[in-house]
Image: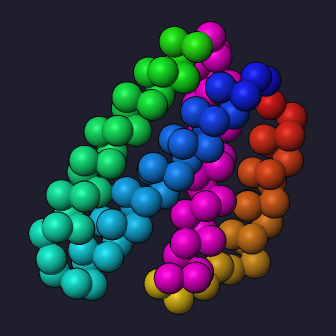
């Protein structure tokens, strides 16, 4: 995978994770800035995904890597910033996600 595709994958994972952080923050802070920020960032996710596809990545591979990366980053954000915990089954699921990313 070339550097541009890696940069786009990292970007889409980071932007979607930040969007989810904004939306979760909105639930606890009741400030519409967080809601607007989350919605705008999700719009940016669509644009980055378009660029990812345009640069030649197959849709199934691009979507798998993006979703897997986001699942892991959101679990980490939930744990670090919102004190959310994971069950043993969820941790096993994250390990399986890592394995699937390697296989793809």
Across and down, in percent, residue 56 comes to 62, 11
Quadrant housing the C terminus: top right
Q: Which quadrant would the N terminus be assigned to in this image?
A: top right
Q: How many tags in the picture?
A: 0
Instruction: Tell me if I can see residue 74 in this picture.
Output: yes
In this rendering, is residue 53 above or below 88? Answer: above
Magenta highlight: main SS: helix
Q: Position of residue 80 (x, y in %)?
A: 58, 82
Q: Is 72 included in the stretch rendered in magenta?
A: yes
Q: Is residue 99 left or right of residue 33?
A: right
The residue at 47%/28% (across/down) is 49
In this rendered view, identify the residue nearer to me: 59 or 36.
Answer: 36
Q: In the picture shown, does residue 95 fall above or below 56?
A: below
Q: Residue at x 27, y 84 (%)?
A: 28
Q: Residue 40 location, x and y as percent?
A: 25, 47
Coloration of the structure image: rainbow
> Percent position (x, y) of residue 38?
29, 57
Residue bounds of the magenta highlight: 56-81
- The residue located at (62%, 71%) in the rendering is 76
Which residue is pictured at 61% across the width and 61% down the height?
A: 73
Residue 33, image quadrant: bottom left
Determine the image quadrant of residue 101: top right
Locate residue 12 relative to residue 36 in the image: left or right. Answer: right
- Residue 2: say if magenta: no
Above or below 57: residue 89: below
Return the residue nearer the eye: 56 or 92. 56
Closest to the observer, 82 or 99: 82
**Rendering quarter of residue 72:** bottom right
Q: Is residue 103 above or below residue 22?
A: above
Residue farthest toward the front in the current orientation of the protein = 3
């Amino acid at each position: 995978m070339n550097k541009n595709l890696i940069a786009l994958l990292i970007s889409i994972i980071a932007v979607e994770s930040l969007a989810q952080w904004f939306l979760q923050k909105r639930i606890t802070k009741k400030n519409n800035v967080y809601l607007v920020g989350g919605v705008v960032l999700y719009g940016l996710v669509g644009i980055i995904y378009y660029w990812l596809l345009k640069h030649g990545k197959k849709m199934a591979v691009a979507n798998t890597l993006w979703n897997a990366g986001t699942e892991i980053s959101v679990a980490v954000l939930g744990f670090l910033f919102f004190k959310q915990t994971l069950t043993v089954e969820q941790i096993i699921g994250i390990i399986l996600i890592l394995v699937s990313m390697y296989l793809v």
